[in-house]
Amino acid sequence: MNNKKDNFKRIAEKRTNKVIESISKLQNLTNTSFYEYSYEQIDAIFEAIQQELDNQKRIFENDKKKGKKRFEL
């Protein structure tokens, strides 16, 4: 098999699962016996996460476009 593809799959799965696990741990912050928060803080957390997700996706999409060079005069 293609070693680069295998490496990508192995590392991507490991990193993705780590990200999902970390995001899931945010639910622990909902315990109001230990934490107090505002909806503005919650919005800020999820906005920051979404911005980084969008940024990373854009990087992959731009990288994919690099391979599609068109001839133009």
Image (cartoon, rainbow, N blue to C red):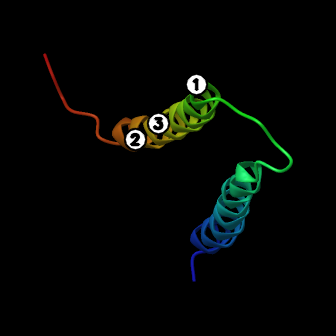
Q: Residue 38: image x %, image y %?
A: 64, 29
Residue farthest toward the front in the current orientation of the protein: 33
Q: Point out the tag, 1 or 3, that comes first from the N-terminus.
A: 1
Q: Point out the tag, 2 or 3, that comes first from the N-terminus.
A: 3
Residue placed most toward the observer, 64 or 25: 25
Specify few, some or many for label 3: CA neighbours under 10 Å numbering under 14, 14-19, or 20 or more.
few
Quarter holding residue 9: bottom right
Q: Secondary structure at mark 3?
A: helix
- How far apart are labels 2 and 3 at the CA level? 10 Å
Q: Which residue is mark 2?
A: 61
Residue placed most toward the observer, 33 or 12: 33
Residue at figure coordinates x 57%, y 76% from the top left:
2
Is 73 above or below relative to 30? above
The amino acid beneath tag 3 is Asp
Q: Are marks 2 and 3 in contact (CB under 8 Å)?
A: no
Q: Point out the tag, 2 or 1, that comes first from the N-terminus.
A: 1
Residue at figure coordinates x 86%, y 47% from the top left:
34
- How far apart are labels 1 and 3 at the CA level? 21 Å
**Is 39 on the left or on the right of 32, as rendered?**
left
Q: Which mark is residue 54?
A: 3
Quarter holding residue 73: top left
Q: Residue 48: image x %, image y %?
A: 59, 30
The amino acid beneath tag 1 is Glu
**Is 73 on the left or on the right of 3, as rendered?**
left
Q: Secondary structure at mark 2?
A: helix
The amino acid beneath tag 2 is Glu
Residue farthest toward the right in the current orientation of the protein: 34
Q: Residue 16: image x %, image y %?
A: 64, 62
Disc nearest the viewer among 1 and 3? 1
Q: Which residue is mark 1?
A: 40
